[in-house]
Image (cartoon, rainbow, N blue to C red):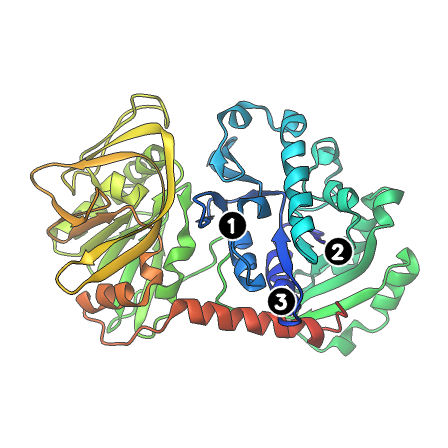
């Protein structure tokens, strides 16, 4: 089990690397994270939602992604509210419960998922959340030491040494544990080390003298293209002569990792946009999905981004909305059941109307993309409600999954730009003359790079 001294210590990356390292050694391995908080969700083949990190870790382990690998997923929809996904499905009861009162209801589900996975595999790679040193959350814990004790896991504490203060973080975290919890700690891991290990001097030995726990791995800093668990770290700027794409970022934007391939294409510059600025010089504007479409739409209006998007569309810039972005581009969002707090007018750039519903569509879908040549589009759906088109819009994808109106398009399918042919066609329409490579193959190669760090770091697992 990997536990971090802080959030973003690199646990997810290391879990991915360990899963592939063990799979390469012929071990039947699977990932597990009891509870994850992220709006970057993936859809399993069975039609359930799990965190993007656990989906990637399953691929690293070469096993089919399963909702048991992330039985509880919290999807933030406001500063103090989250939609709770239990075993892949929205659970209204859990969503309505106060944070500190959920454990009696959720713990049996977490425990059963853990043990059923363990029964089917030779090894589990477990990941915690945040830090086990958060003593204020100890009574509600069902993701950190509670899991380690439940299955008697070997625990490794991970610190991001690139931030500084690692030895204090590791010592302080260890001191916050109970005697029973300390007994499970087998080693400390210094992650993202950017320099010469000799610079550490006697510090690892000093830490072992204080705790009795050795530093078992010093993992080099590796820049990689793997998706982030719950963050967005890409930056970009407008570059004349390139294909320039504006990616609009609003509160509760979701599944932003599906646009990662664009950031890695030569000759393409993707610029994250969070405030009003002229967009008419861009070749395309993308509105991503959102966990709270109505709130994100209100943000566009409050910042003036709505006017800039409309101006760009009027001047012929290609505008693409994905899922919640599609809904925002329409004429109206109707919310008869109060799913997102009420009705809202859309941006009016696409003659479609969305009606939100309590039931949530979660599935993989394959539809004809260019019927003339037999091309298909395959992606995943995660959305509330149905969108219907008016006379001004035409069908882009069948079954209400995609609409077009001049240079404005909207689709419900996530992940299309991760597909080589679709991304190639999208960029070619913008004037790009490059050649897209297979993104899945690129990610697999990045996983292998991560796996190679495990023995190189001295980690004897």
In whole angstroms, how far apart are the C-alphas of marks 3 and 1?
A: 25 Å
Q: Is residue 222 visible?
A: no
Q: Which residue is mark 3?
A: 23
Left-right relation of 53 to 304: right
Instruction: State the SS at label 1.
Output: loop
Instruction: State the SS at label 3.
Output: helix
Q: Residue furthest front?
A: 120
Q: Is residue 266 visible?
A: yes
In whole angstroms, how far apart are the C-alphas of marks 1 and 2?
A: 20 Å
Tell me the quarter of the image containing the N terminus. Answer: bottom right
Disc 3, disc 2: CB below 8 Å?
no
Choose between 123 and 183: the one closer to the eye: 123
Residue 441 appears at what percent x and percent y?
A: 44, 71
Tell me the quarter of the image containing the C terminus. Answer: bottom right
Left-right relation of 357 to 158: left
- Residue 347 occupies quadrant: top left
Task: Please tell me how crowded label 3 is: few (under 14), some (14-19), or many (20+) other residues with Cα within 10 Å.
Answer: some
Residue 230: mark in rendering: 1
Q: Earlier in the sequence, mark 1 or mark 2?
A: 2
Using the image, determine if residue 210 lies above or below residue 421: above
Instruction: State the SS at label 2.
Output: strand
Q: Which residue is mark 2?
A: 157
Choose between 148 and 378: the one closer to the eye: 378
**Which one is closest to the eye, mark 3 or mark 2?**
3
């Amino acid at each position: 089990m990997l536990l971090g001294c802080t959030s973003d210590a690199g646990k997810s990356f290391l879990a991915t690397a360990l899963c592939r390292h063990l799979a390469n050694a012929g071990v039947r391995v699977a990932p597990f994270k009891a509870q994850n908080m992220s709006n970057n969700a993936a859809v399993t083949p069975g039609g359930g939602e799990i965190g993007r990190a656990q989906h990637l870790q399953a691929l690293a382990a070469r096993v089919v992604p399963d909702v048991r690998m992330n039985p509880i997923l919290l999807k933030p929809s406001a500063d103090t509210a989250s939609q709770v996904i239990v075993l892949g499905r929205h659970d209204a009861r859990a969503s309505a419960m106060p944070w500190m009162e959920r454990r009696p209801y959720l713990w049996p589900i977490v425990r059963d998922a853990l043990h059923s996975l363990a029964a089917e595999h030779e090894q589990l790679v477990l990941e915690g959340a945040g830090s086990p040193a958060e003593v204020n959350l100890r009574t509600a814990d069902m993701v950190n030491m509670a899991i380690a004790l439940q299955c008697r896991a070997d625990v490794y504490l991970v610190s991001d040494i690139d931030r500084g203060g690692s030895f204090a973080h590791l010592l302080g975290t260890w001191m916050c544990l109970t005697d029973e919890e300390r007994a499970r700690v087998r080693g400390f891991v210094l992650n993202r080390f950017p320099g010469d290990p000799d610079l550490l001097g006697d510090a690892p030995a000093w830490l072992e003298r204080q705790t009795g726990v050795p530093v078992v791995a010093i993992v080099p800093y590796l820049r990689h293209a793997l998706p982030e668990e719950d963050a967005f770290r890409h930056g970009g700027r407008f570059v004349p002569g390139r294909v320039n794409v504006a990616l609009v970022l609003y509160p509760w934007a979701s599944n932003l990792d599906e646009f990662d391939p664009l950031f890695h294409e030569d000759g393409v510059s993707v610029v994250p946009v969070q405030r009003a600025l002229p967009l008419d010089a861009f070749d395309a504007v993308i509105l991503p999905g959102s966990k709270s479409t109505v709130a994100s739409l209100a943000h566009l209006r409050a910042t003036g981004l709505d006017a800039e998007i409309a101006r760009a569309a009027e001047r012929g810039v290609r505008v693409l909305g994905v899922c919640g972005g599609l809904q925002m581009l329409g004429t109206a969002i109707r919310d008869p059941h109060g799913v997102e707090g009420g009705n809202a007018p859309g941006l009016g750039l696409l003659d479609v109307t969305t009606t939100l519903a309590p039931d949530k569509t979660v599935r993989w879908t394959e539809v004809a993309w260019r019927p003339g040549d037999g091309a298909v589009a395959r992606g995943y759906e995660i959305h509330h409600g149905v969108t219907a088109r008016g006379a001004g819009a035409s069908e882009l994808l069948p079954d209400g999954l995609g609409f077009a109106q001049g240079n404005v398009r909207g689709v419900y399918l996530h992940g299309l730009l991760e597909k080589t042919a679709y991304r190639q066609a999208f960029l070619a329409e913008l004037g790009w003359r490059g050649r897209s490579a297979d993104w899945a193959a690129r990610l697999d190669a990045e996983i292998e790079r991560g796996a190679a760090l495990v023995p190189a770091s001295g980690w004897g697992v």
